[in-house]
Image (cartoon, grey):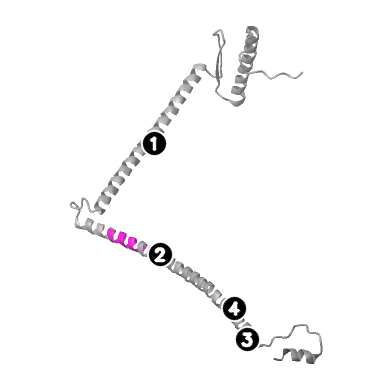
Amino acid sequence: MVRGKTQMKRIENDSSRQVTFSKRRNGLLKKAFELSVLCDAEVALVIFSPTGRLYEFASLSTNKTIERYQRHMKELHDAKSKVSDEHMEHFKEESITLEKKIKSLEQSKRKLMGDDVETCSIEELQQLETQLDKSLSSIRARKNALFMERIDKLYEEEKLLLEENAMLKEKLEMPSSFQSGLDQERDDNDDDDGIPEVETELFIGLPESRKNRWMP
């Protein structure tokens, strides 16, 4: 017979709950004993029944095991606190260092803008001048590069416009040549007007009679 899976919820029936408690308690105490013997582990087990009755098992002593547990938890807490304090101290030092760097950068920025230079020494002023010269060189180099890019772009636009202009010019010249061809064809037709017309009128009779008819 297959044993059904026990639902993990409170057993409502008092008798069934008491029977289950007794069985599971004994099994748990047995497992604790086996663990302590087989693995040479220090085990302490404390169980309170629903009625408040105490059941316990200890491989050495329950009180000693509880004291050991408390010492371990205290050492663990102290270690975490120490690490936390070290981290906080490190963060404070890093924050102070960053604050000093920010102040130094702000002072340098003000001096580069020409403010607070009255308190600068000759060496500091020379350093500021060198920094400004480097900055100006970088700015001029970037400006010249942008100018060259703009000039190249304009050259490309000019090339495209010239090509487009040439295409439009070709389109404008095409009708003139076409008109010249029409004029030439018209002149050829005018030259053909000097050719005598062929007599196409129908005439019945002898050739002599036809000749006399056309004579005045």
Q: Find residue 14 and report its horizontal and vertical position in percent.
A: 62, 7
Instruction: Classify mark 1: helix, strand or loop.
Output: helix
Q: Residue at x 47, y 69 (%)?
A: 161
Circles 2 and 4: CB atoms closer than 8 Å: no
199 relative to 22, above or below: below
**Above or below, 112 relative to 98:** below
Query: Which percent across, then down, holds residue 99?
Result: 31, 42
Q: Residue at x 62, y 25 (%)?
A: 38
Instruction: Report, in whole angstroms, how far the alpha carbon at label 2 lies from the one at label 3.
Output: 62 Å
User: For the residues marked 4 and 1, what is the alpha-carbon distance in whole angstroms?
Assistant: 99 Å
Closer to us: 32 or 6: 6
Q: Is residue 122 left or right of residue 59?
A: left
Q: Earlier in the sequence, mark 4 or mark 1?
A: 1
Who is closer to the viewer here, 157 or 42?
157
Query: How many residues crowd around disc 1 within 10 Å: few (fewer than 14), some, or many (20 or more)?
Result: few
Q: Position of residue 178 (x, y in %)?
A: 58, 76
**Which residue matches tag 1?**
87
Name the residue tied to disc 2: 150
Residue receiving disc 3: 191
- Mark on residue 73? none
